[in-house]
Amino acid sequence: KTGVWSTLQASIYLHSTAAGNFKSAVTAAAAVSGSTVTTTVPATGIGGWFGMTTTATVSLVSVQPWIIPALAGYGIIAVGGPYIVLRKCHEHWRRATTDLNDKF
């Protein structure tokens, strides 16, 4: 038997890419969740009934809720993409191992 065929360089590259992408996805989520915006809202009490407004500082996610699925999608694609490629590489390596073991 010839052992197991694998490309260490590709394996390390894909693992480190996934880890780096995970770090950037977490950093982006933390940055977005900590961001605030100033918005105009109706005044409280009787002033609000007459159309008066005031400004309030609120979370960015509360003003733009579509950011949540966008961040989730980015995380899934950024981290899952390299692992899908790694899975495909493992299939090729398994076939190469079988071919080499059968031939020698």
Image (tube, rainbow, N blue to C red):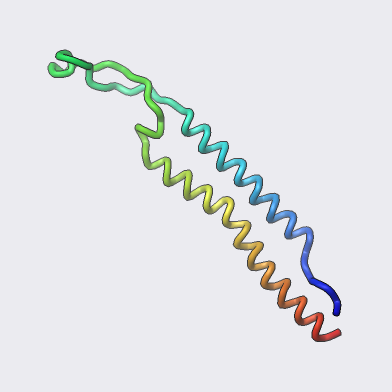
Residue lying at 67% horizontally and 50% vertically, measured from the top left: 17
- Taking 45 as reference, is 33 above or below it? below
Residue lying at 37% horizontally and 39% vertically, measured from the top left: 65
Residue lying at 48% horizontally and 33% vertically, measured from the top left: 32
Residue 4, image x and y in percent? Answer: 80, 71
- Taking 66 as reference, is 3 above or below it? below
- Taking 32 as reference, is 11 above or below it? below
**Farthest residue toward the bottom?**
103
Kindly indicate the quadrant of the structure image that contains residue 58.
top left
- Taking 80 as reference, is 36 above or below it? above
Kindly indicate the quadrant of the structure image that contains residue 99.
bottom right
Quarter of the image for the N terminus: give it: bottom right
Quarter of the image for the C terminus: give it: bottom right
Residue lying at 74% horizontally and 55% vertically, measured from the top left: 12
Q: Is residue 76 left or right of residue 1?
A: left
Disc tally is 0
Q: Is residue 38 left or right of residue 42?
A: right
Residue 13, image x and y in percent? Answer: 72, 54
